[in-house]
């Protein structure tokens, strides 16, 4: 009567500290340049080595430019990227250098290289580590002190979260993607609805969802506060992982699959909380506010101030003031300035296929600046191999180089103050895409449709 | 970050009445590119884009710039932040906890915290105290009517008291972490001491 989460958690317990947390063994630590330098400093302070360097994989992604990758102009960003490389050399950690074919956004690279596997415990100093849960791993974002703890001991101290199952049942409508499912769930549950929980996604919609879609959904688990998102591995997972660079091969593969098939919640497993949504209720979604839960169906209207409590009305008003939207307003048809396809949320091959399916044979609107940024060099190569780059080029778009890019404005791709961006990234926070930038979150299909028309556009109508 | 032993903290508070105050607000991404560990550097970046406008001029009506709350934290003064619900949501950046600690804050009180940020605060020796929404609402009201309102956070007894109203609540913290805070001990040292158990786990696997 165990949940999938229980099974992975229990199999990694080193000890339960008396009246305290659990010491959990970590199979994989991913490290990027932003949240690791101070952790390596801690090791140097204490004069200790990395305990299990072969369990650690590092790559820069946040500071990486997307126009060229020969150099980084910003000396501070450059120092951070150089520091990661130097730390990896000093401590004997595998490092995927910027501008090489192994590099990309950590949460895109991990699964596509078969470094994230079912049943693993995975951590990274990055909240979107939840992404890797899509392969059936327990994957959690951590802070830099905890990165140091894992480097030093390959373990972490955590209190066990509660369990929640979110079931999605039925067939998604045309024009509705995993991104829309996630934005819908967040709007129902709020951005703290799953705080303190590990969420397992289940139901027929999930079973029929592609691996890329599952990675998108799991990626956004943190945006409703959950400690991790997890999806039981199945034939879709195995087909995705088979033959990947670091996935088991031959006999080891067969043995691994036999084990992975046991990784599912028992029929009588009890969850602390369980909710069910219907796929048919989900339309293409956009956000109107400054948290990812502030979303509506694309043809809907922004909430009015009297539709919420007095306390919430003040916060809603401040969000709408920042976004320059009016209560009760319809957003469909509003001009956009920037379009961003990419990020660990939607920077995979399927996202580029979806974008291309909309823009094929059409032209980018003149008023729009578009950044199309693959999540990794492997994704970029696949885009070229499939001829998607030609479709994009003919429609007036340019394919950029792998980077976190405009998701968080830590590299040259910043949306200027006051400009409105429609983006496949994960956060519409105040100033997230650049100081003063206004962000609408949406799916690759919706972003593509809007890139063609220059206004917020329902992908079902193009 | 400086490690200070916890016992009883009695202090006035800075009320930051923002729900879902995410870590991007607590410290904007551009400060994340720095590899320093200087608490002062991160303390100055705390709530930067709400404290300062685009020309780096203080925003007069933001709470931290108001005369009642602008004094930098020191013993008994502004060592406590009272935040809105879902404090520290979003990015896992520990820089947000460094900013709070670097500013001089020792306790953050809210009705709910995001999980990763809560762990980060503890690892930076800032105590997150979870209170009921009623306690939080009353405390905001007490501070509003008297910015000199004192709150007592008694770590040994796990109680938090609004001295203006006398309202007191128990708060949760596990025994291990309480011991660590009261003795200024790091998790990493505990883990290093338990290396034999880690190796035993690996061998069993």
Image: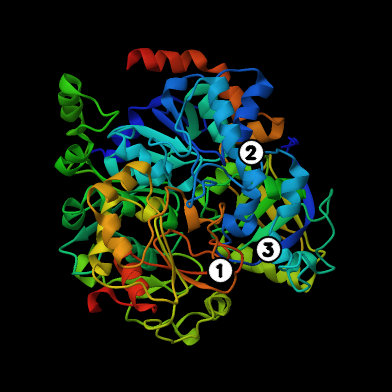
Q: Secondary structure at mark 2?
A: helix
User: Mark 2: few, some, or many residues within 10 Å (few <14, many ≥20)?
Assistant: some
Q: Is residue A237 above or below residue B138?
A: above
- Kindly identify which residue carries mark 1: A437
Q: Nearer the viewer, mark 2 or mark 1?
A: 2
Q: CA distance from mark 2 to mark 1?
A: 26 Å
Q: Is residue B63 above or below residue B154?
A: below
Q: Secondary structure at mark 1?
A: loop
Residue A333 as seen in the image, left or right of residue B114: left
Q: Going from the N terminus, do you reach mark 2 or mark 1 first?
A: 2
Q: Are marks 2 and 1 in contact (CB under 8 Å)?
A: no
Residue A60 is situated, as x and y percent measured from the top left of the image, at: 50, 39
**Residue under the image location 79 percent in, 56 percent down:** B78
Q: Is residue A405 above or below residue A119?
A: below
User: Mark 1: few, some, or many residues within 10 Å (few <14, many ≥20)?
Assistant: many
- Kindly identify which residue carries mark 3: B49
| Number of marks in picture | 3
Task: Identify the chain of the residue marked 2, using the numbered disc in the image.
Answer: A
- Kindly identify which residue carries mark 2: A79
Task: Identify the chain of the residue marked 3, using the numbered disc in the image.
Answer: B
């Amino acid at each position: 009567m165990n949940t999938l989460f229980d099974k992975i958690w229990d199999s990694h317990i080193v000890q339960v500290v008396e009246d305290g947390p659990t010491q959990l063994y970590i199979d994989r630590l991913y490290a990027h340049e932003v949240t690791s330098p101070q952790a390596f400093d801690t090791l140097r302070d204490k004069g200790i080595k990395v305990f299990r360097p072969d369990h650690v994989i590092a790559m820069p992604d946040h500071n990486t430019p997307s126009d060229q990758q020969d150099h980084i102009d910003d000396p501070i960003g450059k120092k951070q990227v150089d520091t990661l490389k130097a730390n990896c050399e000093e401590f004997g950690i595998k490092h995927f250098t910027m501008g090489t074919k192994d590099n990309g956004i950590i949460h895109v690279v991990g699964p596509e290289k078969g470094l994230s596997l079912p049943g693993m415990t995975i951590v990274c100093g990055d909240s979107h580590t939840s992404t890797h849960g899509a392969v059936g791993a327990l994957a959690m974002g951590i802070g830099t002190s905890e990165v140091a703890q894992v480097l030093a001991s390959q373990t972490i101290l955590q209190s066990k979260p509660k369990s929640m199952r979110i079931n999605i049942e039925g067939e998604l409508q045309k024009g509705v993607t995993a991104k829309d499912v996630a934005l819908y769930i967040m709007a129902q549950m709020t951005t703290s609805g799953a705080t303190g929980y590990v969420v397992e996604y289940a139901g027929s919609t999930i079973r029929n969802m592609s691996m890329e879609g599952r990675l998108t959904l799991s990626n956004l688990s943190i945006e409703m506060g959950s400690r991790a998102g997890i999806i039981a591995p199945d034939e879709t997972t195995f087909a995705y992982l088979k033959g990947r660079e670091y996935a088991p091969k031959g006999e080891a593969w067969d043995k691994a699959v036999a084990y992975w098939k046991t990784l599912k919640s028992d029929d009588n497993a009890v969850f602390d909380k369980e909710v069910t949504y219907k796929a048919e209720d989900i339309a293409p979604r956009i956000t109107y506010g400054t948290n990812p839960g502030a979303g509506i169906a694309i043809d809907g209207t922004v909430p009015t101030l009297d539709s919420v409590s007095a306390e919430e009305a003040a916060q809603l008003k401040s969000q709408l003031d920042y976004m320059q939207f009016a209560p009760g307003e319809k957003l469909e048809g509003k001009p956009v300035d920037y379009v961003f396809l990419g990020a660990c949320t939607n920077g995979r091959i399927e996202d580029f296929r979806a974008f291309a399916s909309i823009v094929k044979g059409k032209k980018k609107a003149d008023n729009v600046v578009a950044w199309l940024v693959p999540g990794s060099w492997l994704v970029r190569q696949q885009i070229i191999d499939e001829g998607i780059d030609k479709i994009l080029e003919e429609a007036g778009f340019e394919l950029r180089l792998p980077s976190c890019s405009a998701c968080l404005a830590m590299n040259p791709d910043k949306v200027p103050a006051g400009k409105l961006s429609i983006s496949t990234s994960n956060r519409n926070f105040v100033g997230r895409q650049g100081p003063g930038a206004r962000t609408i979150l949406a799916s690759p299909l919706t972003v593509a449709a809007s890139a063609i028309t220059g206004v917020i556009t329902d992908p079902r109508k193009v | 970050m400086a490690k200070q032993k916890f016992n009883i903290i009695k202090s006035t508070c800075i009320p930051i009445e923002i729900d879902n105050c995410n870590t991007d607000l607590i410290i904007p991404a551009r400060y994340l590119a720095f590899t320093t560990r200087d608490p002062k550097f991160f303390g100055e970046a705390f709530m930067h884009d709400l404290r300062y406008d685009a020309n780096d001029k203080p925003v007069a009506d933001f709470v931290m710039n108001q005369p009642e709350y602008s004094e930098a934290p020191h013993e008994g003064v502004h060592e406590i932040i009272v935040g809105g619900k879902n404090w520290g949501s979003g990015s896992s950046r520990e820089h947000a906890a460094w900013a709070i600690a670097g500013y001089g804050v020792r306790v953050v009180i809210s009705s709910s915290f995001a999980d990763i940020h809560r762990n980060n605060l503890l690892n930076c020796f800032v105590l997150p105290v979870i209170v009921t929404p009623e306690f939080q609402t009353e405390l905001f009201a007490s501070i509003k009517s008297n910015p000199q309102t004192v709150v007592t956070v008694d770590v040994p007894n796990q109680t938090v008291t609004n001295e203006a109203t006398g309202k007191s609540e128990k708060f949760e913290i596990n025994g291990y972490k309480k011991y660590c805070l009261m003795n200024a001990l790091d998790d990493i040292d505990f883990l290093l001491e338990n290396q034999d158990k880690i190796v035993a786990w690996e061998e069993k696997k």
